[in-house]
Image (spheres, rainbow, N blue to C red):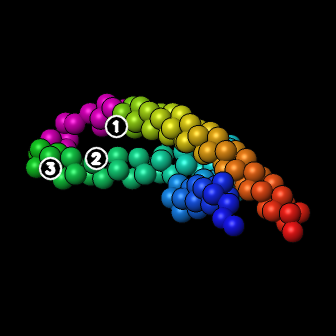
Amino acid sequence: MLNFKKIRLMTKLAVYENKEGKEDIYLSKYYKQDYVRLQVIKSIISATIGYILIIMMIGFYRMEHLIKKAVSLQYKTIGGYILGFYIIIITIYGLGSYLGYSMKYDASRKKLARYFKLLKRMEKIYKESTHEY
């Protein structure tokens, strides 16, 4: 005889495993601190590469001006501005990714807790069905 409760539960578990569960199960392999730290490092590296590319594009665009004024430019001031903006951008990216990935990890843990609760319920249903025979 069909056990509709069991079928419904199996369907919920399968849908979760095939969609968002893959990433949640992958995240469960990490401690929160390690996962967040890895993602923050990735974000900072990406922001640094992007910042360098933007600075290079601006430099190439203004190359004629830079060559004409090469002797009279205040390199310390320009370097200070570039470094200051870099520190601001890295701080924003670092804090943003820290907060974002912390929330993502916490949400993943909540979903996994619900998933494991459903798995326990499924195990209980299987134990009950084996005792019936």
Question: Is residue 105 among what the camera can see?
Answer: no
Q: Which residue is drawn at 40% across and 36% down?
A: 89
- Amino acid type of the residue that numbered disc 2 sits on in the rendered structure: Ile
Q: Which mark is residue 55?
A: 2
Q: Which of the marked residues, 1 or 2, is nearer the chain's N terminus?
A: 2
Residue 108 on image: x %, y %: 60, 45
Q: Residue at x 74, y 56 (%)?
A: 122
Residue 13 on image: x %, y %: 62, 57
| The image quarter in which residue 6 lies | bottom right
Q: Nearer the viewer, residue 51 or 43?
A: 43
**Element at badge 1?**
helix
* Residue 78 drawn in magenta: yes
Residue linked to disc 3:
61
* Label 1 with label 2: CB-CB less than 8 Å: yes
Q: Which of the marked residues, 1 or 3, is nearer the chain's N terminus?
A: 3
Q: How crowded is mark 3: few (under 14 residues within 10 Å), some or many (20 or more)?
A: few
**Element at badge 3?**
helix
The region drawn magenta spans 69-81
* Residue 106 drawn in magenta: no
Q: How crowded is mark 2: few (under 14 residues within 10 Å), some or many (20 or more)?
A: few
- Vertical arrangement, residue 46 with respect to residue 7, above or below: above
**Element at badge 2?**
helix
Residue linked to disc 1:
82
Left/right placement of residue 15 relative to residue 58 reads: right
Figure quadrant of the N terminus: bottom right
Q: Which of 111 and 88 is in front in this view?
A: 111
Figure quadrant of the C terminus: bottom right
